[in-house]
Amino acid sequence: MPQAVVHVLFVIIVLDLFRDHFLKDKRELPLHYIFIGGIAGLLPDIDVLLFWILNNFLGIGVPWFHRIFTHTFLFVLIFLFISLIYFDFNRKSSKLFAVIAFGVAFHIFLDWLLVGGVAPFYPFSGSVFGLNLIGRLNLPLAVEGLEAFVLLWWLWHEEKLHRISDFI
């Protein structure tokens, strides 16, 4: 799994770029929604916490189940479905759940692209798919280097677009 910072940072960057370059009215995607989307980028790894609680606090010996239930299209569809339910009578909540669905989907995409693989069709199929680019490169600290590069590029972008150095 890429580091947690990769999941949070990449979702925040993609949502921020979408907000800056594609939305005509930035109020349609408030900054706190982008932050929530970044946090949602961690949601698929909630199974790690659940596994830890079951085994260490409750004493229920369960086998390792990371990337089985929460790294699926079904998990993304739950949040999209909630977004659709709210669509007609509460647009803010609908947008919020759509942003959460995006964060979850982007996490799954990153795991598919960078490390190991995911079983996106579980429980209908246990087939695992993934490019495993980090594993194939066989470079120590590749994830850390990638996150440092992306963070620096994004800070440069924010400086050019929003002059963030004025706030220092």
Image (spheres, rainbow, N blue to C red):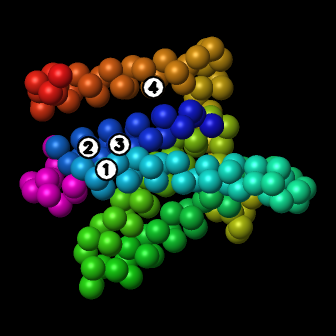
Q: Which residue is mark 4?
A: 147
Q: Quadrant of the N terminus?
A: top right
> What amino acid does circle 2 point to?
Asp
Determine if the magenta segment contains residue 39: no
Lower sequence index among marks 4 and 2: 2
- Magenta highlight range: 21-30
Q: Which residue is mark 3?
A: 12
Lower sequence index among marks 1 and 4: 1
Lower sequence index among marks 4 and 3: 3
- The answer to which of 57 and 80 lies nearer the viewer is 57
User: Label 4: few (<14), some or many (≥20) within 10 Å?
Assistant: some
One can see residue 139 in this view: yes
Q: Which label was assigned to residue 34?
A: 1
- In the depicted structure, whether residue 81 falls above or below residue 123: below
Q: Which residue is mark 2?
A: 16
Q: Could you tell me which secondary element the residue under label 4 belongs to? A: helix
Contact, CB < 8 Å: mark 1 with mark 3? Answer: yes
The answer to whether 91 appears left or right of 149 in the picture is left
Instruction: Give the residue displayed 38% in from the left and 52% down from the top.
Output: 37
Instruction: Give the residue displayed 81% in from the left and 54% down from the top.
Output: 57
Residue 22, position as x, y percentages in the image: 17, 49
As measured in the structure, the alpha-carbon distance from the residue carrying label 3 to the one carrying label 2 is 6 Å
